[in-house]
Amino acid sequence: MAAASVLPYADTSFLIALYGDDGFTEAARAEVLTLGLALVIGDLNELEYRNALRLLNFRKLITARQLTARLASFQKDLQSGLLRTQETDWPKVWGIAEAMSEKSTAKEGHRMADLLHVAVAQSFGAKRFLSFDDRQRSLARQQGFALNALT
Protein backbone atom coordinates (compact mmCIF):
# COMPACT_ATOMS: atom_id res chain seq x y z
CA MET A 1 0.00 0.00 0.00
CA ALA A 2 1.41 3.42 -0.89
CA ALA A 3 2.35 5.73 1.95
CA ALA A 4 0.03 8.51 0.80
CA SER A 5 -2.97 6.18 0.97
CA VAL A 6 -2.57 5.41 4.68
CA LEU A 7 -0.77 8.44 6.17
CA PRO A 8 -0.88 7.45 9.87
CA TYR A 9 -1.46 10.09 12.55
CA ALA A 10 -0.41 9.03 16.06
CA ASP A 11 -2.12 10.65 19.03
CA THR A 12 -0.55 10.96 22.47
CA SER A 13 -2.06 7.76 23.87
CA PHE A 14 -0.45 5.86 21.02
CA LEU A 15 2.92 7.55 21.60
CA ILE A 16 2.78 6.83 25.35
CA ALA A 17 2.18 3.14 24.56
CA LEU A 18 4.79 3.03 21.79
CA TYR A 19 7.57 4.43 23.97
CA GLY A 20 6.39 2.94 27.24
CA ASP A 21 5.55 -0.32 28.83
CA ASP A 22 1.82 -0.63 29.33
CA GLY A 23 -1.07 -2.81 28.22
CA PHE A 24 -1.05 -1.29 24.72
CA THR A 25 2.71 -1.23 24.07
CA GLU A 26 2.77 -4.52 22.18
CA ALA A 27 -0.13 -3.44 19.96
CA ALA A 28 1.47 -0.06 19.26
CA ARG A 29 4.80 -1.59 18.30
CA ALA A 30 3.10 -4.21 16.11
CA GLU A 31 1.14 -1.47 14.33
CA VAL A 32 4.31 0.50 13.58
CA LEU A 33 6.05 -2.60 12.25
CA THR A 34 3.05 -3.55 10.11
CA LEU A 35 2.69 -0.07 8.64
CA GLY A 36 6.38 0.33 7.92
CA LEU A 37 5.79 4.07 7.54
CA ALA A 38 6.72 7.22 9.38
CA LEU A 39 4.04 8.37 11.81
CA VAL A 40 2.88 11.94 11.31
CA ILE A 41 2.57 14.19 14.34
CA GLY A 42 2.24 17.91 14.95
CA ASP A 43 3.26 20.40 17.58
CA LEU A 44 0.20 19.45 19.65
CA ASN A 45 1.48 15.86 19.89
CA GLU A 46 5.02 16.90 20.75
CA LEU A 47 3.99 19.13 23.64
CA GLU A 48 1.25 16.84 24.94
CA TYR A 49 3.52 13.76 24.81
CA ARG A 50 6.35 15.45 26.69
CA ASN A 51 3.93 16.89 29.23
CA ALA A 52 2.21 13.50 29.71
CA LEU A 53 5.57 11.88 30.47
CA ARG A 54 6.42 14.61 32.98
CA LEU A 55 3.02 14.11 34.59
CA LEU A 56 3.63 10.36 34.84
CA ASN A 57 6.91 11.15 36.57
CA PHE A 58 5.21 13.63 38.92
CA ARG A 59 2.65 10.96 39.83
CA LYS A 60 5.53 8.52 40.45
CA LEU A 61 4.31 6.19 37.71
CA ILE A 62 7.65 6.40 35.93
CA THR A 63 11.09 7.21 37.32
CA ALA A 64 13.23 10.17 36.35
CA ARG A 65 15.47 7.74 34.47
CA GLN A 66 12.49 6.37 32.52
CA LEU A 67 11.36 9.93 31.75
CA THR A 68 14.79 10.82 30.39
CA ALA A 69 15.05 7.61 28.35
CA ARG A 70 11.59 7.99 26.79
CA LEU A 71 12.21 11.62 25.91
CA ALA A 72 15.54 10.65 24.32
CA SER A 73 13.95 7.82 22.29
CA PHE A 74 11.21 10.15 21.11
CA GLN A 75 13.77 12.78 20.07
CA LYS A 76 15.88 10.17 18.29
CA ASP A 77 12.86 9.02 16.27
CA LEU A 78 12.00 12.61 15.38
CA GLN A 79 15.54 13.09 14.08
CA SER A 80 15.63 9.75 12.23
CA GLY A 81 12.27 10.30 10.55
CA LEU A 82 10.31 7.48 12.19
CA LEU A 83 8.18 10.33 13.53
CA ARG A 84 7.51 13.02 10.97
CA THR A 85 6.40 16.42 12.15
CA GLN A 86 4.05 18.41 10.00
CA GLU A 87 3.26 22.07 10.42
CA THR A 88 -0.20 22.63 11.84
CA ASP A 89 -2.55 25.02 10.06
CA TRP A 90 -4.28 26.20 13.24
CA PRO A 91 -7.05 28.28 11.59
CA LYS A 92 -8.00 25.21 9.54
CA VAL A 93 -7.86 22.98 12.64
CA TRP A 94 -10.09 25.37 14.62
CA GLY A 95 -12.68 25.31 11.83
CA ILE A 96 -12.69 21.51 11.62
CA ALA A 97 -12.86 21.19 15.42
CA GLU A 98 -15.74 23.66 15.67
CA ALA A 99 -17.70 21.79 13.00
CA MET A 100 -17.18 18.47 14.81
CA SER A 101 -18.10 20.05 18.14
CA GLU A 102 -21.29 21.54 16.75
CA LYS A 103 -22.27 18.22 15.19
CA SER A 104 -21.56 15.82 18.04
CA THR A 105 -20.24 17.15 21.36
CA ALA A 106 -23.67 17.83 22.90
CA LYS A 107 -24.68 14.24 22.09
CA GLU A 108 -21.42 12.42 22.78
CA GLY A 109 -19.41 14.54 25.22
CA HIS A 110 -16.19 15.06 23.27
CA ARG A 111 -13.38 16.88 25.07
CA MET A 112 -11.40 19.67 23.45
CA ALA A 113 -8.31 17.42 23.15
CA ASP A 114 -10.41 14.81 21.30
CA LEU A 115 -11.59 17.41 18.82
CA LEU A 116 -8.12 18.88 18.34
CA HIS A 117 -6.35 15.59 17.71
CA VAL A 118 -8.91 14.44 15.16
CA ALA A 119 -9.00 17.88 13.53
CA VAL A 120 -5.20 18.02 13.29
CA ALA A 121 -5.13 14.55 11.72
CA GLN A 122 -7.82 15.56 9.26
CA SER A 123 -6.01 18.81 8.38
CA PHE A 124 -2.84 16.80 7.66
CA GLY A 125 -4.72 14.55 5.25
CA ALA A 126 -4.13 11.48 7.43
CA LYS A 127 -6.13 8.38 6.59
CA ARG A 128 -5.29 6.25 9.63
CA PHE A 129 -5.77 7.44 13.22
CA LEU A 130 -3.60 5.65 15.79
CA SER A 131 -5.01 5.91 19.30
CA PHE A 132 -5.92 3.93 22.39
CA ASP A 133 -8.28 6.66 23.64
CA ASP A 134 -11.89 5.49 23.29
CA ARG A 135 -13.37 8.96 22.76
CA GLN A 136 -10.82 9.96 20.16
CA ARG A 137 -11.25 6.63 18.38
CA SER A 138 -15.02 7.12 18.28
CA LEU A 139 -14.72 10.63 16.89
CA ALA A 140 -12.04 9.57 14.38
CA ARG A 141 -14.22 6.68 13.20
CA GLN A 142 -17.10 9.12 12.63
CA GLN A 143 -14.77 11.25 10.51
CA GLY A 144 -13.93 8.26 8.31
CA PHE A 145 -10.49 7.36 9.62
CA ALA A 146 -9.21 3.79 9.65
CA LEU A 147 -8.12 2.84 13.18
CA ASN A 148 -5.35 0.74 14.69
CA ALA A 149 -6.11 -2.55 16.41
CA LEU A 150 -6.43 -2.50 20.19
CA THR A 151 -4.61 -5.80 20.71
Image: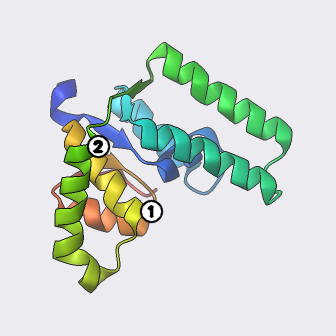
Residue at the image position 18 percent from the left and 73 percent from the top: 102
Q: Which residue lies furthest to the top in this view?
A: 80
Q: Tell me, yes or no, if residue 101 can be seen here.
A: yes
Residue at image x 46%, y 42%?
A: 45
Q: In which quarter of the view is residue 116 placed?
A: bottom left
* Residue named by callout 1: 133
| The N terminus, quarter of image | top left
Q: How crowded is mark 1: few (under 14 residues within 10 Å), some or many (20 or more)?
A: some
Residue 74 image point, x, y percent: 59, 29
Judging from the image, what secondary structure is the residue with disc 2 in? Answer: helix
Given residues 80 and 30, the one toward you in this image is 80
Left or right: 54 as drawn, with respect to 147: right
**In the image, residue 43 lies at what x, y percent?**
44, 37
Type of residue at label 2? Trp
Judge whether 84 appears above or below 123 on screen: above
Residue on which the image places disc 2: 90
Q: How is the image coloured?
A: rainbow
For mark 1, give the secondary structure: loop
Residue 127 visible, this orientation: no
Task: Specify few, some or many for label 2: CA neighbours under 10 Å numbering under 14, 14-19, or 20 or more.
Answer: few
Instruction: Tell me the amino acid under the disc marked 1.
Output: Asp
Left or right: where 95 falls relative to 43: left
How far apart, in angstroms, are the residues tagged by discs 2 and 1?
Answer: 22 Å
Q: Residue at x 84, y 36 (%)?
A: 65
Find residue 25 and report its horizontal and vertical position in percent: 57, 47
Q: Which of 19 and 71 is in front in this view?
A: 71
> Which label's residue is closer to the chain start, 2 or 1?
2
The nearer-to-camera label among 2 and 1 is 2
